[in-house]
Amino acid sequence: MTCLVSSWSLCAQKNDEVAVVDLKFKETPLVKYVNETNLEKADFKWLVVEVGFTPREKKISKDKFAWLDNLILQYEVLMPSYHNGKNVMALLTGEVTYWAIPLDGKKHVFEGFIPPQIIDRYLRSGLKANRKALESSVAARVTFYNKSRKLLARYYSSLKGEDDAKMEKVFDRATDSVEGGVLVLKDSVYGRADTPWRDINFSSYDLIKKNDNQP
């Protein structure tokens, strides 16, 4: 875990848990329609990067917290893939900007979603969507930026046998070509607002910025 202290105190106090990155496979939530039939496959699963984040509490008055605007999360996921007849690593990327986050000292959850069609197409044959495959084959890096693209913090998912320093080198070697054994798939990690989860427990999640007209 790499944590850079900023003016709005992203890092919690010493010994506090600041952020944890986890990888999960989730089935598509189904909406029941009166006049339509669901055609979704039961095993059609998304790969979800889940980030549990705890900001340091900061108040501007007795009953009001300070707010953090325009927090950009860059999601990067490395997974075993197959391209042009050879085994490679696929680097899947995406960004989500969160508009208004209360600095309330409580746990917030951010999520990046990789659609099942992308998983089915690019996940190397022989690997199944299960916990064992996640721990041994798939890794995530989540980078926090402010509106000016200043690096605030960076976190990694737990990959068996590897520490953050090792994972940092692995991700930094990933380039925008298949040279070196890396296939880059840009904009393949979606924000919650672009998934079937957009209307589920809406008030339990921080607002995703819709456009640049917001402050």
Image: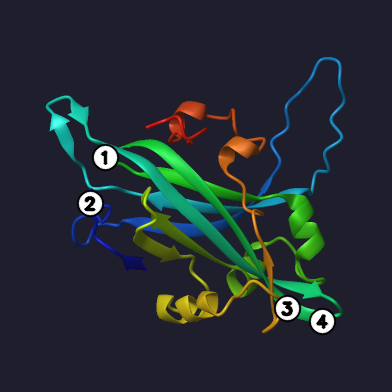
The reply to whether discs 4 and 3 touch (Cβ–Cβ < 8 Å) is: yes
In the rendered image, the vertical position of residue 69 relative to residue 15, given as above or below? above
Report the residue marked by disc 1.
Answer: 103
Question: Which of the 4 image quarters holds residue 88?
Answer: bottom right
Which circle's residue, 4 or 1, is located before the other in the chain? 4
The reply to whether discs 1 and 2 touch (Cβ–Cβ < 8 Å) is: yes
Q: Which mark is residue 27?
A: none
Report the residue marked by disc 4.
Answer: 86
Classify mark 1: residues with Cα within 10 Å, few (<14), some (14-19) or many (20+). many
Q: Residue at x 57, y 40 (%)?
A: 192
Estimate the x, y position of residue 112 in percent, counting from the top left.
56, 50
The amino acid at mark 2 is Ser
User: Taking 40 as reference, is 195 left or right?
Assistant: left
Report the residue marked by disc 3.
Answer: 88
In the rendered image, the vertical position of residue 180 relative to residue 21, given as above or below? below
Question: Which of the 4 image quarters holds residue 68?
Answer: top left
Describe the element under mark 3 as helix, strand or loop. strand
The reply to whether discs 3 and 2 touch (Cβ–Cβ < 8 Å) is: no
User: Taking 120 as reference, is 165 left or right?
Assistant: left
